[in-house]
Image: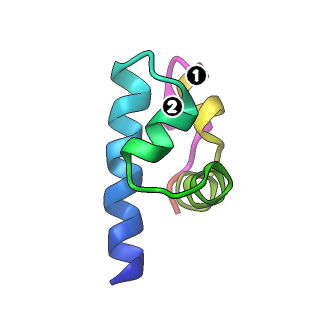
Amino acid sequence: MYEYLNQKRISKAEELLSTTGESVTEIAMSSGFSSISAFNRTFKSIKGCSPSEYRGKSSTDEMCRKK
């Protein structure tokens, strides 16, 4: 259940990173994470790159690999 919840949170974060100009911290909190470090760690473990790297790439599929 915990993994499912994290997947849902990261999916929301991906959408916000791609479609808004909100800061990574704001997105972390909006996605249900209580700390930026937990968000960064979880995002990287699921997506293979940091939230900032994800946002900065024109083609996120090339740079971020799903695990």
Residue 63, position in %: x, y? 61, 35
Dot 2, how many residues are within 10 Å of its Cα: few (below 14), some (14-19), or many (20+)? some
Q: Which image quadrant for residue 57?
A: top right
Q: Is residue 5 shown above or below 45?
A: below
- Residue drawn at x 40%, y 80% is 2
Residue 21, position in %: x, y? 44, 15
Q: Is residue 3 shown above or below 31?
A: below
- Residue drawn at x 63%, y 31% is 52
In this figure, which residue is indicated by the disc labeled 2?
60
Q: Which image quadrant for residue 56?
A: top right
Residue 7 lies in the magenta-colored region = no
Whether residue 29 appears in this view of the structure is: yes
Give the amino acid type for the residue marked by disc 2 in the picture.
Thr
Q: Is residue 9 shown above or below 59?
A: below
Give the amino acid type for the residue marked by disc 1 in the picture.
Lys
**Residues at marks 1 and 2 touching, judged by CB atoms closer than 8 Å:** yes
Q: Which residues are magenta?
A: 56-65
Circle on res. 57: 1
